[in-house]
């Protein structure tokens, strides 16, 4: 059973990486192919519209996935999330062939369709919910691996979209679609394997949350028959699963993930206006930041997994994280710091 739990955890991390890569490639495809006036920072345009709609779809999609987790199974929620990202990939990639009006459809229909099952944030939600069932001595390592995979996939997504779109507008969509198809195959395999390893009498459709955390679970009313209206009514009540200890960490994690995801346009915009660097140079500096973030997640997580079995972040980890954040903010704020961080003479 322990071996199966490890396989499930690693497979869920792999699915997270593939879906995050597919989602980021799709999001960056519009930013890569659109006109400069449509994505100009610090102004209201289609780029801003896509960002706002993407955030709205993430919030709605996570509520949908939470309902599915509480009433169905984790595999059903993962399939819905994968289908949601794949639908956004198809809509965004197809809109490129529309000609003059492609940008409007890509900026609106692509993000909105992810309301069905969320985007990469929904994938992280499912991954964290699955990883929380792991043993405490391995849990923190998986948490940090989640952060590292997310940051790495976001970086690879932006690079892949810009590089592949130079050769063909179809290649980014093909890569995203392939990632979704591979993820779907992995989910089907995990569901079948899980059904084979379960004890007699267990049902694959049983909800992911424990019995004490089910929403409006009555003795005569199975979870699969919970009305959607009752679910929405109790979502913020005292019986909400978000108030349980199993999921109490999720709001903090999603706040940090949302902040990290939104810092890329903020960072690149600031460094371009402050120091006059080109967009390509700003992306290269962001890549340095991503490498440092991955290193921080991995090495700190490995140290924690080997020495700690607590569910709480200790003071040493907090100090390291604050040190990295403070050093990065201080370096960015210094005049001419870009020339000292990167190799080369100032222009």
Image (cartoon, helix red, strand yellow):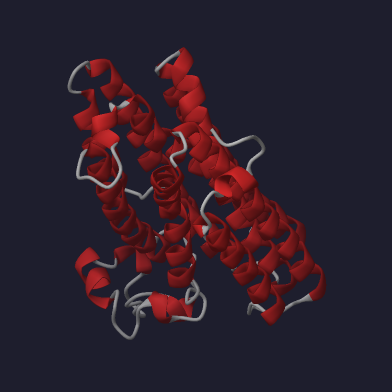
Observer able to see residue 46:
yes
* Residue at (40, 46) in percent of width and height: 265
Observer able to see residue 18:
no
Front-lying residue, 206 or 295: 295
Say whether residue 302 is left or right of residue 198: right
* Residue at (19, 45) in percent of width and height: 44
Front-lying residue, 247 or 347: 347
Front-lying residue, 224 or 295: 295
Q: Quadrant of the N terminus?
A: bottom right
Q: Where's residue 77, x and y in %? A: 43, 53
**Across the whole image, how many numbered discs are drawn on residues?**
0
Answer above or below: position of 296 versus 192: below
Q: Where's residue 64, x and y in %? A: 32, 57
Question: Please, which residue is most extreme toward the right here?
Answer: 306
Q: Where's residue 138, x and y in %? A: 72, 66
Question: Please, which residue is most extreme toward the top here?
Answer: 167
Q: Quadrant of residue 276?
A: top left
Answer above or below: position of 327 versus 37: below
Say whether residue 66 is left or right of residue 245: left
Answer above or below: position of 29 versus 58: above
Front-lying residue, 17 or 216: 17
Question: Please, which residue is most extreme toward the bottom here?
Answer: 238
* Residue at (48, 73) in percent of width and height: 247
Q: Where's residue 170, x and y in %? A: 41, 17
* Residue at (32, 73) in percent of width and height: 221
């Amino acid at each position: 059973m322990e071996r199966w739990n490890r396989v499930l955890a690693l497979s869920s991390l792999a699915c997270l990486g593939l879906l995050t890569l597919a989602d980021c490639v799709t999001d960056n495809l519009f930013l890569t192919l659109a006109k400069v006036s449509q994505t100009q920072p610090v102004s209201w345009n289609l780029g801003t519209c896509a960002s706002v709609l993407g955030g709205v779809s993430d919030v709605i999609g996570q509520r949908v996935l939470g309902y599915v987790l509480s009433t169905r199974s984790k595999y059903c929620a993962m399939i819905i999330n994968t289908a949601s990202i794949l639908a956004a990939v198809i809509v965004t990639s197809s809109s490129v062939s529309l000609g003059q009006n492609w940008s409007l459809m890509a900026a609106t229909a692509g993000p909105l369709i992810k309301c069905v099952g969320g985007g990469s944030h929904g994938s992280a939600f499912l991954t964290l919910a699955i990883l929380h069932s792991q043993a405490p001595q391995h849990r923190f390592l998986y948490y940090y691996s989640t952060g590292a995979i997310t940051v790495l996939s976001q970086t690879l997504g932006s690079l892949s979209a810009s590089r592949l779109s130079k050769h063909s507008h179809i290649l980014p969509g093909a890569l995203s679609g392939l990632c979704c198809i591979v993820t779907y195959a992995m989910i089907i395999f995990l569901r079948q394997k899980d059904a084979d390893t379960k004890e007699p009498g267990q049902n694959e459709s049983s909800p992911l949350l424990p019995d004490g955390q089910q929403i409006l679970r009555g003795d005569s009313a199975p979870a699969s028959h919970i009305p959607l209206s009752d679910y929405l009514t109790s979502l913020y009540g005292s019986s909400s699963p978000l108030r349980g200890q199993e999921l109490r960490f999720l709001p903090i994690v999603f706040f940090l993930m949302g902040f990290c995801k939104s810092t890329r346009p903020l960072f690149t915009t600031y460094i371009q206006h402050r120091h006059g660097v080109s967009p390509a140079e700003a992306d290269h500096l962001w890549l340095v930041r991503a490498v440092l973030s991955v290193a921080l997640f991995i090495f700190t997580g490995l140290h924690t997994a080997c020495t700690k079995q607590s569910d709480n972040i200790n003071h040493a980890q907090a100090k390291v994280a604050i040190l990295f954040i403070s050093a990065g903010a201080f370096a960015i704020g210094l005049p001419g710091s870009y020339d000292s961080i990167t190799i080369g003479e100032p222009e």
